[in-house]
Image (spheres, rainbow, N blue to C red):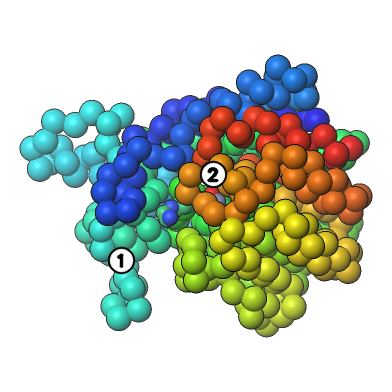
């Protein structure tokens, strides 16, 4: 398996997140990628490639300019603000967490205050912005773009091993540890390349098998017919992101019918999961896409500390086999998975069925 990986992610190492009413160690840490990298290396399962910079407009297409400007500049501006207040600041130690949000009884007024700006673009308090969050996130999106470049060559499947994850990031909001939506960037870049190659009516399917609903990916493509979004995830009545991901969200406008949510109850095992995966794959097959992007989360594993499905390590072989039988050029993007010890073995079961 060709695996794209860039060490830049290590610089983004949030110390704590606001969770269950207190500051707790951040689940989304560099150790996640390190574990997978070491395991795949030891098993001889990966050919490593460093993410390179390709000319692409995909990030600017799926995200809003003001949001990108915010992500790029907020950390230094926040530090300057603290310095002006007379504080001694070590930027490497500063993690930004919002506290006030424009919820439905307020208005989304363009904020002037730096606190207002953070709340304006955030969806939760569990996604600290570190000094290197932007650099790491950008490297991860670069990996997704580079992965598409490879599947445009002779390579059938490419895995972009990156963090922070991306599927909760919307056109102009961040949350769930996600800042840029790498799966959306990959799909967009793929369509752009198809258009360049004389295929203006290209289609890409995104299959999201992370435990959490990929609300960002859904939002970005909700009104578009060129990207099918299919997600199997924990019922939002029971799990994050709580406010999106029900089965009746099927797309709007041009995108009507191009969004498929399959929510499952906490406690779901492979028996049921495998059945609904068949349904998901049938929908993708019917869509007839040129390529497939997988948002892969290892947090459906029974040992994940913040999730609630009951998949076992072996089940990921079956999952890989089922998806690989679609026989499509495939880009796999790393999303969640927080039980560090099972991440390597889980990927080592999921990846090999792909050609
Ligand atoms: C990111 B990805 C609620 C705590 C909030 C957010 C989880 C983000 C998961 N239980 N934590 O989809 O794995
Ligand atoms: Zn997740």
Task: Say which of 91 and 270 sits in front.
Answer: 270
Specify whether residue 68 is in view: no
Disc 2 element: loop
Cβ–Cβ under 8 Å for marks 1 and 2? no
Which corner quadrant of the image does residue 232 belong to? bottom right
User: Pointer 1: what residue?
Assistant: 101
Coordinates of residue 108 in the picture (x, y in percent): 34, 73
Q: In this view, does 128 lie to the left or right of 293?
A: left
Q: Residue 304 carries which label?
A: 2
Q: Earlier in the sequence, mark 1 or mark 2?
A: 1
The secondary structure type at the circle numbered 1 is loop
* Residue 76 marker: none
CA gap between label 1 and label 2 equals 29 Å
Q: Is 201 placed left or right of 67 in the picture? A: right
Residue at the left extreme, as displayed? 86
Q: On the picture, is 115 further left or further right than 54?
A: left
């Amino acid at each position: 398996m060709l695996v794209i990986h860039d060490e830049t992610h290590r610089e983004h190492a949030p110390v704590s997140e606001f969770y269950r009413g207190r500051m707790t160690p951040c689940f989304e840490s560099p150790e996640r990628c390190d574990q997978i990298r070491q395991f795949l290396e030891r098993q001889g399962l990966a050919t490593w490639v460093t993410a390179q910079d390709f000319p692409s407009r995909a990030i600017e297409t799926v995200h809003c300019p003001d949001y990108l400007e915010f992500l790029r500049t907020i950390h230094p501006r926040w530090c300057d603000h603290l310095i002006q207040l007379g504080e001694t600041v070590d930027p490497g130690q500063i993690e930004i967490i919002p506290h006030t949000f424009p919820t439905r009884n307020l208005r989304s007024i363009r904020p002037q205050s730096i606190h207002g700006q953070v709340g304006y673009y955030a969806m939760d308090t569990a996604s600290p912005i570190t000094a290197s969050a932007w650099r790491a996130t950008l490297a991860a999106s670069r990996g997704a773009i580079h992965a598409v470049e490879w599947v445009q060559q002779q390579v059938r499947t490419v895995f972009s091993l990156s963090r922070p994850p991306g599927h909760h990031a919307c056109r102009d909001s961040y949350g769930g540890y996600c800042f840029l939506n790498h799966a959306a960037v990959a799909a967009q870049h793929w369509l752009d390349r198809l258009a360049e190659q004389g295929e203006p009516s290209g289609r890409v399917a995104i299959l999201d098998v992370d435990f959490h609903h990929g609300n960002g990916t859904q939002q970005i493509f909700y009104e578009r017919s060129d990207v099918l979004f299919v997600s199997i995830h924990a019922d939002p009545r029971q799990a994050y992101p709580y406010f999106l991901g029900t089965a009746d969200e099927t797309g709007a406008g041009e995108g009507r019918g191009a969004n498929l949510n399959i929510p499952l109850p906490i406690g779901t095992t492979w028996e049921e999961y495998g059945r609904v995966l068949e349904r998901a794959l049938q929908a993708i097959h019917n869509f007839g896409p040129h390529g497939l992007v997988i948002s892969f989360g290892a947090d459906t594993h029974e040992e994940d500390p913040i999730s609630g499905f009951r998949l076992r390590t072996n089940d990921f072989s079956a999952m890989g086999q089922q998806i690989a039988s679609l026989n499509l050029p495939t880009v796999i993007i790393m999303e969640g998975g927080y039980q560090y010890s099972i991440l390597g073995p889980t990927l080592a079961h999921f990846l090999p069925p792909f050609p």
